[in-house]
């Protein structure tokens, strides 16, 4: 019960902060742009599960995620459950999620398994990883068995077996234990 209250309270605070920031931004824009014509505003999505998770986990505003397609893709798939071999909204595994993200966001086709993706990458350190690079994990023995996509520094989006599509950090104890390396797709 306490855990649920804690989650509800966290979401409430995040929404409150989000709306108060938007209100302040609207007021300052109105004062500075009264004589200027501006583009029509796009509809503003506020507080979707993926957006809230990104703000809480990454500690940044959504505009700091530099690639709009990436942001929309993560937001659209956030929370989809894990399903081994799955490649749809009713269930997806880590490698299919990475494949679909790369096809949608970067117009690049990846191999279907995490170990095959690893073979097509230049190995880099986690400190060198940039948005769009891959993070590889050896969870089941000595073979690459899990993959995620870097969204900011040491944070990655992936299809977790326990909670589905979500954001995590390679600094979290579980992922730190199994993290193998970061990889950048080789230019062909």
Image: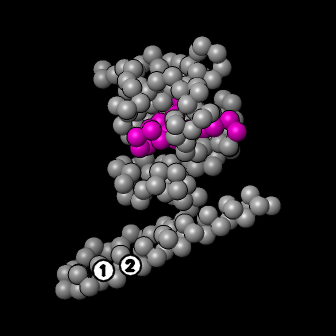
Residue 109 makes an appearance in the image: no
Residue at x 42%, y 74% (from the top left corner): 22
Closest to the observer, 88 or 134:
134
Near-viewer residue (3 or 150): 3
Side (left or right) of 156 relative to 34: right
Task: Tell me which segment is drawn in magenta.
Answer: 146-162
Tell me the CA gap for discs 2 and 1. Answer: 6 Å
Q: Does the CB distance between marks 2 and 1 fall below 8 Å?
A: yes
Question: Is-magenta flag for residue 70?
Answer: no
Identify whether 46 is placed above or below 137. Answer: below
Instruction: Tell me which residue sits at (37%, 58%) in the image.
Output: 63
Q: Residue 101 in the image: state x and y as whole percent.
A: 48, 39
Residue 119, given in percent of the width and then of the height, sits at 45, 16
The chosen color scheme is: one colour
Task: Classify 7 as above or below 71.
Answer: below
Q: Residue 97 carries which label?
A: none
Q: Name the residue under label 2.
A: 24
**Which class describes the residues within 10 Å of circle 1: few (<14), some (14-19), or many (20+)?**
few
**Is residue 143 in view from this perspective?**
yes
On-image quarter of the C terminus: top left
Task: Read off the residue under disc 1.
Answer: 28
Q: Where is residue 39 in the image (x, y as percent from the top left)?
A: 27, 73
């Amino acid at each position: 019960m306490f855990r649920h209250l804690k989650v509800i309270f966290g979401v409430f605070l995040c929404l409150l902060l989000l709306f108060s920031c938007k209100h302040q931004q609207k007021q300052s824009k109105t004062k500075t742009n009264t004589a200027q014509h501006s583009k029509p505003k796009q509809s503003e999505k506020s507080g979707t599960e993926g957006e809230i998770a990104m703000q809480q986990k990454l500690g940044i505003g959504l505009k700091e995620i530099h690639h709009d397609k990436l942001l929309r893709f993560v937001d659209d798939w956030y929370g989809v459950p894990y399903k081994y071999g799955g490649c749809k909204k009713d269930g997806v595994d880590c490698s299919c999620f990475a494949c679909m993200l790369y096809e949608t966001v970067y117009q690049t086709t990846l191999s279907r398994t995490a170990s095959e993706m690893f073979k097509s990458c230049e190995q880099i350190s986690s400190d060198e990883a940039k948005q769009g690079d891959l993070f590889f994990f050896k969870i089941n023995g000595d073979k690459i068995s899990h993959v995620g996509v870097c969204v900011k520094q040491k944070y990655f989006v992936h299809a977790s077996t326990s909670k589905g599509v979500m954001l995590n950090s390679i600094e979290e104890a579980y992922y730190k234990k199994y993290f193998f390396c970061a990889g950048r797709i080789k230019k062909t």
